[in-house]
Image (cartoon, rainbow, N blue to C red):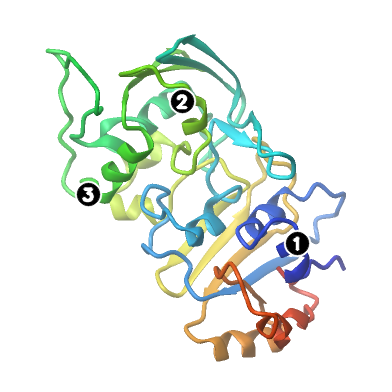
Amino acid sequence: MSKLTRRSILKSGGVAASTLLLPRFAIAQGDNRPSVTIAVQKVTNSNVLDVLREQSNVGERVFFSSVWEGLISKNWRGNLEAVPGLATEWRRIDDQTVEVKLRQGVKFHNGDELTADDVVFTFSRERMFGETEAKNRSTIKAFEKIPTPRPGKELPPDVPAVARRIWPDLVRVDAVDKYTVRFYNATPDVTIEGRLSRYGSDIMNRRAWDESASYLDWARKPITTGPYKVVELKPDVSLTLEATTNIGVAVRRSSASASSKCLKSRAASMACCRANTSSLATSRRTRSPASRRTPHSKCRAAPSSIIA
């Protein structure tokens, strides 16, 4: 049985990378992949799985390369340079406009194919910006109408606030064809490509949003393209993910399922780890030499789990 130690993952790039390493492991294996359980103090701070509401390293641990994916990614095992994600290529039309070509054949967790319509909606007022305007926008189209969300689909105030922090001058995103979109900025911006690769610019499925009864229903089970799909989020209790079978950006998943269990105390976490029922993860960045020698770094995995 293959085993990852918490210490080896820390050496590979920090705790936030632990979620990244699991789904991206490209190794030959049969169908007897293990299920992974990780004990954490908090699954998400906001009790939802919306990348625009979970802007912490807690959220990164869950979202990055597990559930959500963006148009432009980063080479996490190299020099963090930009690499194709859900987009295969991108080019500058001018200093305010970037055109992006989508990867064809990528499927969302509900079976829908990723198209330009999903990208346009992801960066729309209804999903992201609400009634906010680009900071340096000089004119407003006379025919432009700000959509009124249906009851229950109102965005929490922090969603457009975070969206405008990421995209202060984005005016609109247009579909050129089924697999091509253009991003239009109000002012010249050399960082548009960087903003596309930023946490929070990840792509969602439009139909899933439309079919959800409320924002909260959608935010606790978003439909995305990542290597793992959300099975269930129990706020302050657990998050269960299941490996997907469709091939998008990610390589074959190294575990059949992954779950995070929220344990309220260090004692409970240690007991769980010693009992070999789960691995232990923490969002703390640094530790004293004494704390690094605590027993949880030496826990051994039971046959049905691995140390993460």
Q: Residue at x 36, y 62 (%)?
A: 46
Which residue occupies 38% across, 59% down?
A: 48
- Look at the image and tell me in which quarter the C terminus lies: bottom right
Check the image and name the residue furthest to the front.
288
SS for tag 3? loop
The type of residue carrying mark 3 is Pro
Query: In the visual, does 134 lie left or right of 33?
Result: left
Residue that label 2 marks: 192
**Residue pictured at 38% horizontal, 38% vertical:** 166
Amino acid type at image mark 1:
Lys
**Residue 214 visible here:** no
Secondary structure at numbered mark 1: helix
Residue 287: percent from left, percent from top: 62, 75
Query: Separation of disc 1 and disc 2 at Cα?
Result: 31 Å
In the image, which is nearer the foreground, mark 3 or mark 1? 1
Residue under label 1, please give it.
11
Task: Measure how far apart labels 2 and 3 are at the Cα level.
Answer: 24 Å
- Reading the image, the residue beneath label 3 is 157
**Mark 2 or mark 3: whose residue is earlier in sequence:** 3
**Residue 40 seen in render:** yes
Picture quadrant of residue 286: bottom right
Q: Is residue 176 above or below residue 22?
A: above
Give percent across and percent down for residue 81.
Answer: 66, 33
